[in-house]
Amino acid sequence: MSKRNLRSALITTTALALMASSAIAQDKRKFEGTEINVLYHGASFLPGLAELVPEFEAETGIKVNIETLSEAAALQKAQLELATGSGAFDIVGVQSGNMPLYAANGWIKPVADFVGTDVSDPAQLNIDDFIPSTLTGMAVDGKQQCLPFFAATVMLYYQIDKFKDAGVEMPPTSFDDFVKAAAAVHSDSLPALALRGSPASSAGNIWAFNLFFYGHGAEYFKDFPNDYTPTVNSPEAVQALETFVNLKQNYAPEGAVSFVFDDVVTSMQQGTVAMVIDGAPLAGRILDPEQSKVSGNLGFAVVPGGVAGPEPSFASHGLCVAGNSDAPEAAYMFLEWATSADTMVKVSQNSNYLATTRNAVWEHPDFVGKYNFDFGGGEFLKVYQASLNEAPADYYPPFPGWGLVGERMGQAVQEAEIGQKTPQQALDDANEDIAKILKNEGYLK
Amino acid sequence: MNTNGPTYHEIDKGLQKAMNRRANAGYRRFLAPAMIIIAALTVVPILFTVGLSMTNISYVSPRPTRFIGFDNFIQLFRDERFLSSLWQSAILIFGPVAFQLIFGFFLALVMNERLKGLGWLRVIFIVPMFFPPIVMGLMWKVLFTPQLGGINYYLSLIGITGPTWLSEPMTAMIAIIIAATWGWTPFVAIMFFTSMQTFPRDLYEAARIDGATWTQQIKFVTLPLLKETALVVLVFRIMEALAIFPIIFVMTSGGPAGSTETVNYYSFVSGFTFLKVGYASAMILTFLALLVMLLAPATNLLLRSIETEGGSK
């Protein structure tokens, strides 16, 4: 699958680069007085971007309003506004997993339509500079839909001294060693591990669970995208859920079953758990000098794996021009500016944003200077890059029905976690339901 | 009998009829704008929802949208998640309302006593009414969270290890019932209290002269007099309790594992997360129909009792 992705990435990049090179000079003040509205969740990028908006407004005369909500709320609101065609927003954020859904319904105007026109500035766009996998996640059938601003994968964060005291060598590379490490360090006063628990298809427990699922060699479907017969109760899948449930039931803090990413970040930031697996982009927040109690003591590692090796979670987030925007060109100008290398470097400095999708930013001295944490337990940027290389681009199977499948899976994981069902039973039920769901929606005969 | 023409009485009646008709026509003209607004805001959306519920409209499906008759409704009753959400709705609607009526009654009794310093207490009693449901949900979520909230701390002081409230199906349910009871008991108490203020004092005096104890006064004077208010409050509270949505949204999001998911929450998730708009429409209409069937007798009873009382006066 990664080969397929790579190929389409190359096609997209080449096509866009060709179009970009033939662009006409951009008139920055063409849309003076236009007002555009932007909607997405607040994680890392948008708050920092909002601080820079006055620069864009001064340059172009376009007025920009940014609305940020929680991840789940932003998703719901964006989908509602787009589906009803309200035209309330000109730019919406999209996660790579939802790209097929948005494209299938015509909810967004592909950025490919603007590249090469007089609203695009090829030097600013510099399409070849984007990390290919992030660009692929934002393309459908080889056509670039959105521009990525955020490349998220996960890593293992741990408190170096706690594991030294327990005599555990870090980091573990297999799930078995990982469980052993958790057992060795765990105590009532310091639970070993925090993971997301609240069920949801993308931002919730599946974000954490899928890395165990794929790591054990399990797959969602018999032969995606040719045969959607679900296989979520395979022996590998059951094994994955058993591992996950064991960790959550025996080595996690109280209430972890409903943890969202904020809870995980806070647990690590406050040092109330020995380790967490969550987003690499969250390191900036975890190590925020004003709030962190683990600064100087935090180790970084690629997540452990099973027979299939490590499969760190992956999602890229992008900005898109809304399908029914009444100012699509002005919106595109903003989008191109927002995802430019210059802007990204600035945002990385005025906020905790480090999940950049551009090579130029990865290599920028300001960026490296701020984020290359190393406290003797792994070099942060190196681990981040290694994780991005391991991460599967299609961590969430890319088709419009994924939300339904992922949500049902999230529920099954939680049922097993609270002991309502055994892992086998929870997954058997989920498999049956997912087959029904897919039949209902016309993916299965 | 007068055969030469209509009697005075008859003329009077006819005149009155004509006048009534005229007056009615006038009233109708004045009513028209309100009727149009009501139609636009309730009838049209409901009809639109009925239309949607008979299609397979879904944004996640590759199939084209088409008319499917009652298929959605048939599918609903095969959907285990819907059936359990019905059951959970019943618990989360009637549970809090029952407690609100009980606690509201006792609060009203206390408020009704003319004790010194009660003025301030009355103000404190109604504080929960000022909280918007979202704020209320957030506050209780914090209180019920083991690491943050006070509830388990105070329980530990008396030697009880508190549960992880919102992480287990049973305790999550109890937590929501507690929050909802806390939030709307003051409304019930105020309704009961204002009603009690109108009860004639002499009834109590007569009862006392007859040797009735305090509990007997409550049983034989207060409660019978309160019956109608109680019925009004009950109907209003049940209707309003359907809007328990924000508390669930904030405190549990229907979890853990769907154990606190009510029908309106499931319908919201189906419509706005799963984007199965036709199915969600069918679900909420079914719920509406069930509620109308349930509440119609109570409302009828209420209107009849008010009418008969009006007639006797």
Image (spheres, coloured by chain):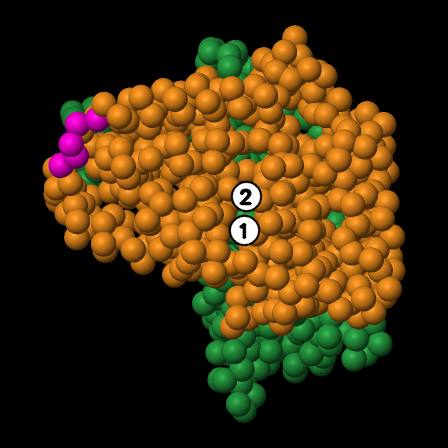
Q: What color is chain B drawn in? A: green
Q: Is residue A254 shown above or below A121?
A: below
Residue A81, quarter of picture: top left
* Residue drawn 60% across the image and 24% down it: A2
Q: Is residue B16 magenta?
A: no
Name the residue at the top extreme: A445
The residue located at (51%, 42%) in the rendering is A151
Q: Is residue B300 left or right of residue B31?
A: right
In the image, what residue occupies the spot 28% across and 39% down? A124
Chain under label 2? Answer: A
Task: Kindly state the secondary structure of the residue where label 1 is placed.
Answer: helix
Magenta segment, which residues? A23-27
Q: Mark number for residue A281?
A: 1
Spatial separation of the CA atoms under disc 2 and disc 1:
6 Å
10 Å neighbourhood of mark 1: few (<14), some, or many (≥20)? many
* Chain letter for the orange part: A
Residue A410 appears in the rendering: no
- Report the residue at 21% width, 26% height from top: A23
Badge 2 vs badge 1, beta-carbon distance below 8 Å: yes
Dot 1: chain letter: A
Q: How would you classify the magenta stretch by its main secondary structure?
A: loop
Pick the residue in front: A29 or A79. A29
Res. A214 visible in picture = yes
In the rendered structure, find residue A152 and report the number of the disc placed on it: 2
Where residue A172 appears, x then y in whole percent? 79, 50
